[in-house]
Image: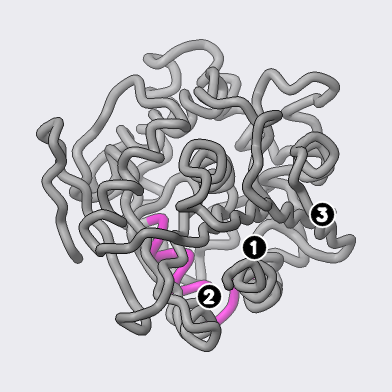
Amino acid sequence: MRKLHLADGRTLEYLVAGPADGIPLVLHNGTPSGAKFFEPMVATAARHGLRVVVHSRPGYGDSSPRPGRTVASVAADVTAVLDELGADRFLTVGWSGGGPHALACAALLPGRCVAAATVAGVAPYAADGLDWLDGMGAENIEEFGAAVAGEAPLTAFLTAQVPGLAAVRADEIAAALGDLVSQVDRDALTDEFAEYTAALFREAVAGGVAGWRDDDLAFIGDWGFDLGALKTPVSVWQGAEDRMVPYAHGRWLADRLPTATAHLKATEGHLSLMLNAFDAIVADLARHLP
């Protein structure tokens, strides 16, 4: 794990893997999460000549909390990491709660961000014409109901989830996710992917719920940038069997982002999509490189 000391006094932890001369593929993990790799994805990126960079958003792991952060805040942190690596351009992919953060990089770092992908990523909470909670699993409906109620109810709700996730094992992760996983996602949670997913959740809550809470509050607030002004190429990947981020979110983003290319998959879920389509996602991004 690498640590970067930022100008505002915060610490940001991040990881880098892959060819040293590779263009960075900045990966934004979901919510909750942290700086952790799934090694087969690192190998996939390397086959396309890319090195994977992932950081823990503020409040996760050893990254200092940043209360009141917006989705747009990620652009400054990614810039600091890329400056440290000496990288003048990058590709980015955001999965689930990472999707809005990838879009923020595309919107706020034009030119430097060559292309972006959102994979099973949420749309804005106040999106016109979208019933944001419709189709979500019961746990998400309760969680975001708490988020709308305010920071204190959300903190209490998330804190109550920590014991069930802090020591979750690979063979328990599907049950722990409950109504949030469709059958296709349950089928995906085997072997090393189940190990990775369980480890990601354990790491996400090891230091408390500050990162998780601030992610949720950022999602339901003003994201801090204009999706309609995007000029960077964006690919929108979404599965119809997704109970964490329903299909309608991907459809909304694909219809309204001015530079979007849609990849809407009828048979994929939230987890299976990232697992099964990652090579295609990376290949689609890499084609934008000279």
Q: Residue at x 52, y 38 (%)?
A: 104
Which residue is at the front of the view, 238 or 73? Answer: 73
Which residue is at the front of the view, 213 or 68? Answer: 68
Marks 2 and 1, the one that precedes in the sequence = 2
**Where does the image place residue 228, in percent across and percent down from the top left?**
70, 29
The label on residue 193 is 2
SS under mark 2: helix
- The residue that mark 1 highlights is 271
Image height of 15 relative to 207, above or below: below
Q: Are the residues tagged 2 and 1 within 8 Å (C-beta)?
A: yes
Q: How far apart are marks 2 and 1 (CA)?
A: 9 Å
Q: In which quarter of the image is the N terminus?
A: bottom left
Residue 135 in sight:
no
Q: How crowded is mark 3: few (under 14 residues within 10 Å), some or many (20 or more)?
A: some
The label on residue 262 is 3
Marks 2 and 3, the one that precedes in the sequence = 2
Q: Distance between the residues labelled 2 and 3?
A: 26 Å
**Where does the image place residue 243, in percent across and percent down from the top left?**
73, 47
Which residue is at the front of the view, 24 or 101? Answer: 24
SS under mark 3: strand
What is the span of residues highlighted in magenta in the rendered image? 188-201
